[in-house]
Amino acid sequence: MMADEEERDFQNFLRDVDEITDLVQGLNSTDPAVQGKAISDTEKRLHAMEVRDEGECKTKLNRTVINSQTADMQNMETVGRDSFMAVLEQDAKERAKRRKKNERLANALKAKGNDAFSKGEYATAIQRYTEGLEKQKDMQVLYTNRAQAYMKLQEYQKAINDCEWALKCNEKCIKAYFHMGKAHLALMNYNESRKSYQKILEIDPQKESLFKDCMNEVDLQEKKANEEKKALEEFQSGKYMAVSVKELLEKLSRPDQNILYYAGGIRVLTESIKDCTEQTLFRTNNGFSIINDNKIIRRGLCVARKNTAEVELSISLLLLWQAVCAGNEENQRLLLTHPDVNVQLPMLLSCDVPEIQKQSLELLSLYSQTENGRSLLVRHQNLTKWLQMLIAFVSVMDDRASCAMNLLSNLIMEEKFKIQCRIKLSTSVLPLFTQLLKIVKEVNQPALAQCIGIMGDLCADGVIRLQMAESQECWQACLTLVDECCSIGNSAGYQECLSRVLGLMMNLSLESNLVIQEHAVDVSRRCLSLLGSKDGRIVTRAIGVLSRILPASSVAVEEAVKGGVVKRMLRFLKAGGQTTSSYAIKTLAVCTQSNGQAQEEVVKLDKKFDVLLKLLAAENEMVVGNAAFCLSKCFEVPGAASCLLNSNIVMILLKHAGGDAKTTSVQENAAVALGKLCTAEPRHILQLRELNGMAILNSSMKYVQGL
């Protein structure tokens, strides 16, 4: 009943505001008919307000000034429009003044409520927010804040009611929908919760990440509830495996037994976990409290140097956790939030017992295979040392190495993990990584190849890439690995390491610094020596490194040209291959940019520019742009432009320069090439005029003059 009165009170307030606004606009109208109707409506409204109960609504119009004028307004027909407007404006000022005062009081009470909330005094916070609403009924933030306090006291329906009031004040209040979704979720109203979160996305599509997290939480909670319902039904029906889980947990709860008794019992329990029902019964029967409630199990897991029995116990626990967490998000969450497990996982991972390491890796890999599992790891584990710990497994000659690398490959999908990797990269990770590169013969080559690929992927993070690119040791180690792999031969493991390290150097070459300049000559020499490899991936990546490393050093360009790089790039361009061609033409563009010998070799080796003209028709605009750039530099060679007099080069360049190319840099390169062509061989201007392209040529001259 009280809610109905509050609703009526609130709606009356909002209606008053709208009607007063309409009346003021009507009285100010220049249309006599509109103005007359407004005066008539105002008279009726004032009469109605006189008979309304004064205490019915705290937010209704303050008529103090108008009431003081009652005697003067007995006969509305005699009151002039100007005097009536003055009365109404004075009343509006009084109401505004009163509202401003109430707003200050409401804000002060909100601040007191927030202070109480931050101290965990939720009942006091609710009281202060309520007092604030008595001062200003349409203050949205007081409703949402009070809803949040109600949530803390588990009064979810009251929280929902406050969210609904907040939405009456502002129908696009995201916070109201957020708290409403949480409250409905707590009440297990899953569909209503989803509807609330859907509203957030409709109001602000930029909140997609928040929306996904909220919907994921609803899905997990609903799945958990359904699992527990099914598990209870199967237990009550007497299903053997379901009953066994409960009985085994009871046996494991016996105190002061031999440590091997517990290890054996845990193994038997693990074998009983066959599906989601047993996983759920393990959870609902306090299976995760095995460690806390049993001092022998807890000591056996947590002791640093373990004896044989403690090793067996630890392995048994790790196998049990794998069984109960496989595909079960709620169990995964409970395990990682267990304080002992949270602390022990990194220690188990780095202990000196291979089987414990292996089972720890298996458990963590189970988490890393799903987005929710990775999110749990990042949220509940300090992963700053994990990159170093996992990379160390590269030196292990068994499947622990590949398991560790697979785990790392999954973890780097999480942006937060990459950010944590930055912290220890220079001081701990890079020294270990570079050492592994230098001893490629002594480590697990397939795992090392994976590791190099992971470090290359981490370079997508600009901070990590910069740290690695500025490391002298990293570049030297990469070159050492190239030399080692080349000297060993065509072994698949070494070839894979070589391919991955070239990819890493490509990524590092995206940076520009003195360290790269210092190593540019050595890197380009290694890459040139690899161009004869029978492995197409190695050839392509070697060209890719050249395309990025040569711009760092004119000395490297000069040496590469002397080493026959132009002839080789033209050969690769003739053979085709999209990726290879992209890198090869970029390399050619770098060489011809400042090296006259490179320009002359292109003119000599590419008769009538057949290769470059073909590239101008490529779908990849970067290829087109670099081909146009190469042409523009080659036109500086005397007589080069003349060999194209009977070709359609003018039309091709004109189309790219005139707007066919979507990329501005491609348009500019084509325009420059067109200008250079006509400057070097004026006879091309005749064709340009026939194609009405003089305007484009004129616009391109500003680029030509600067070259």
Image (cartoon, rainbow, N blue to C red):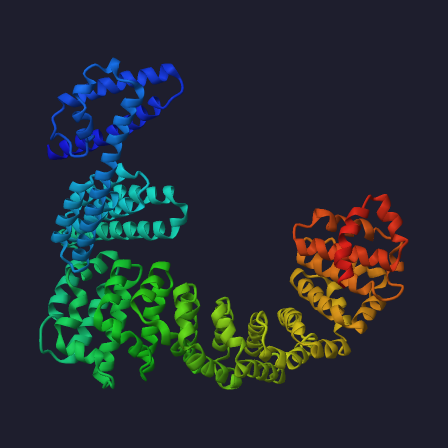
Quarter occupied by residue 50 = top left
Seen at 17% across and 65% down, the residue is 287
- The one nearer the camera, 108 or 232, is 108
- The one nearer the camera, 32 or 472, is 32
- Compared with 199, 464 (above or below) is below
- Compared with 418, 242 (above or below) is above
Q: Position of residue 180 (x, y in %)?
A: 24, 45
Report the side of 700 relative to 681 (left or right): left
Q: Position of residue 450 (x, y in %)?
A: 49, 73
How many numbered badges does the structure rendering display? 0
Q: Position of residue 212 (x, y in %)?
A: 36, 51
Report the side of 567 relative to 122 (left or right): right
Which image quadrant: the N terminus? Answer: top left
- Compared with 234, 435 (above or below) is below
* Residue 632 visible: yes
- The one nearer the camera, 397 or 577, is 577
* Residue 452 visible: no
Seen at 41% across and 49% down, the residue is 206
- The one nearer the camera, 614 or 133, is 133
Seen at 14% across and 66% down, the residue is 249
Report the side of 645 relative to 634 (left or right): right
- Compared with 148, 97 (above or below) is above
Q: Position of residue 670 (x, y in %)?
A: 75, 55
Seen at 14% across and 31% down, the residue is 5
Quarter occupied by residue 622 = bottom right
Which image quadrant: the C terminus? Answer: bottom right
Quarter occupied by residue 576 = bottom right
